Image: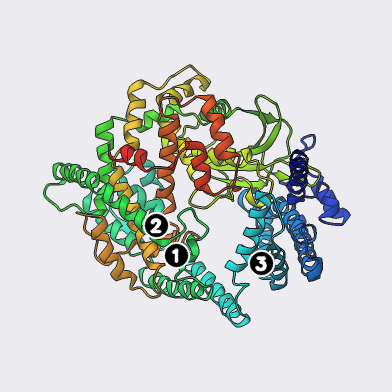
Amino acid sequence: MEVKAKRNDEKKMKRQSVAAVAVVGAAAIVLIAGRALLSLLRRRSKGYPGIKICVNLTASEILNLADRIMAKSKQIYDSVAAVPPNKVCYSNVIVPLAELEAEQFHLVQSCVFPRMVSPSKDVREASIEAERRIDAHNLNCSMREDVYRVVKLFAARGEWLDPEARRYVNHLVKDFERRGLNATSSRRTEIEWLKARIKELCNTFVCNLSEENCYLLFKDSDLVGMPSDFLESLDKTEDGMLKVNIKPIHTYPILKHCKVGATRKVVASAKGQRCLEENTLILEELINLRYKMARLLGYSNYAEYALETQMARTPFKVMEFLEDESRIMSESAVKELQRLKDLKRQEEGESPFGMEDLQYYMHQAEEREFGINYKELRHYFPVESVTQWLLRTYQDLLGLKFDRVQGAEVWHPDVCLYSVLDSVSNESLGYFYIDLYLRDGKYGHTCVFPLQDGCLLRNGTRQLPVAAIIANFSKSEQDNPSFLRFSEVVTYFHEFGHVVHHICSRASFSKFSGLRVENDFVEVPSQMLESLCYESAALKLIGSFCKDIYRPIPDEICIALKRKQKAFYGLKTKEKILMCLFDQIIHTSDKVDTKALFEDLYPKVMVGIPLLDRTSLATSFLHLVTGNEATCYRYIWSEVFAADMFVSKFEGDILNSSLGMQYRNKVLAPGATKDAFAILHDFLGREPSKEAFMRRSTS
């Protein structure tokens, strides 16, 4: 009897697991009616089943698809809302919402992804408009009180569900309530007004920085040490003065390379005063509005609201973490600063060391101490060879096989499509696009976009994940090969870590696919994998992929790069901690004098480096207005856990495929089906620790 009951339970769990995701197999027929859309969905890479995203829609097709997406979404929400209370069950409430989410993700990406990559301005503009419409529609759907009440009613019944399905239902309820659906009508009205005002202020903050066009004038003699190509890129006045704007494209290289201390100080001061008055007013209003919104939603402050869904969970945990890290880094930072002061004394005499000197003398020290000729180093990294090396490393480590898809439909001739297979079973796991080269109209940073979620379909088969990696490298010409800077190699390796995280996920629900993990965990897998770039055993392999002659990177360069990874880590981390503490403090308050706070906080963190008069890094710190508010700590947080995984498992045995498979199965495969701490515990076999991070960063 016990065995029979167990088997019945197992059958029930299997049925619910399949029903849980309820993703429609024939998406074009069930999800969106009409021959027009069916035709669009058939326009995919022919002969390569599983790719549903459309990457080459025209402007009119994008807008048409957006309208149909919104119509179908409204239809599903209306049908769920109409379920009578006595008829509420898993199949008529949860299943429709799950299948809608799973099936619409790649359709939405078909509309909004082209704005990042399409060569056609008309297509990009249509994509931007489609995103605006879809975002507005989704916002309305997310505030459907009638749908929330039905979902809440189902959750309250306590029906038996398998763990992932139960997690999905809990997330649905929590998502609705974090938007205020459990608040009174008057409170919801106020919350919506606050959200709209907050969005408006954030956009204005960003626009102020984008539209700011101030510039400084310098003579050639003021810019000694700057590379010739930088000087040639500068506009000139009629009397021959060089025009330097105060955006990062100019300020960053000057603060790193310019030998003239007075010039660096002028540039650093101007950089710290960007949009100072207008963005200070905006930031302080944002702080107050976010606090009010959080209180209306039932939280003590905005940081508490923002952190509820993160690994850290509470502001206290974050502040404790940041203060511990600041204390740990202090001893190293003081020693590092003294080395920099000694260098400045040798080069400029007894003038005091200021924040304008930090980047320049760190760069000088690294060049002197590690003896790396960066121009020469680039010749070890032809972009094509780096790509082959990267793909081979990930294949061998994670038990994967990448096959280039010939004749695939792509959005530009430079784009390649690869299929991903399990190297042992030959099971198809997904696809990824690689779009590496600079062109007009393309998104300007290296990043990864999930294009199609991996999840179970209603018939028990798996919808394959699809991702795209975007970069802006120069393209090799016949007589002019393109080489990457080492920093670009590391970034490329890091971002491809996001690709394999998305592809290797085995979640049942679209909501838990791949990169949907907590925001303060999403960088951990990629940061762990980028550590391979600093290991000699991995670096030396790149030479075997060079087209001309086998050129292994010399041992002394590999050692120098490894040492450089730790160089001035205390000071660099202190700079990050400064802004993270500022972010956390302002979002645990209702009103803040941000200028006074920054002036008080800066000397406590950046011990020994005076703050320039009338400057504040906060008014140009985009993380405060682009979705990372109260969670800026996550980058340092991620480094701690990435270091723990790498040092505990891979250091000294970095290409061990057995460990790689454990990593794939225990860290990448779960996606967001488990809490991040549980994922780390499963892989490490213990609670995560700071020990490896502290040893790496202070040694």
Q: Could you give the CA–CA distance between mark 2 and mark 3, rounded to whole angstroms? A: 29 Å
From this viewpoint, which residue is outermost toward the front?
1
Earlier residue among tags 2 and 1: 1
- Residues at circles 2 and 1 in contact by the CB criterion of under 8 Å: yes
560 over 150 or under it: above or below: above
Identify which residue is drawn at 30% across, 38% down.
Answer: 567
- Amino acid at the residue labelled 3: Ser
- Colour setting: rainbow
How crowded is the residue under tag 3: few (<14 C-alpha within 10 Å), some, or many (20+)? some
SS assignment at label 3: helix
| 74 with respect to 317 (left or right) | right
Identify which residue is drawn at 53% across, 34% down.
Answer: 663
321 over 403 or under it: above or below: below
Earlier residue among tags 2 and 3: 3
**Residue 86 spot, x, y in % from top left:** 80, 69
Residue that carries the numbered disc 3 in the rendered image: 142
| 643 with respect to 119 (left or right) | left
Q: Could you give the CA–CA distance between mark 1 and mark 3, rounded to whole angstroms? A: 22 Å
328 over 367 or under it: above or below: below
**Residue 656 spot, x, y in % from top left:** 50, 24
Which disc number belongs to residue 303?
1
Residue that carries the numbered disc 2 in the rendered image: 318
From this viewpoint, which residue is outermost toward the bottom?
186
- Indicate the quadrant containing the N terminus: top left, top right, bottom left or bottom right: top right
- Amino acid at the residue labelled 2: Val
- Indicate the quadrant containing the C terminus: top left, top right, bottom left or bottom right: top left
From this viewpoint, which residue is outermost toward the top?
549
SS assignment at label 2: helix
Earlier residue among tags 1 and 3: 3
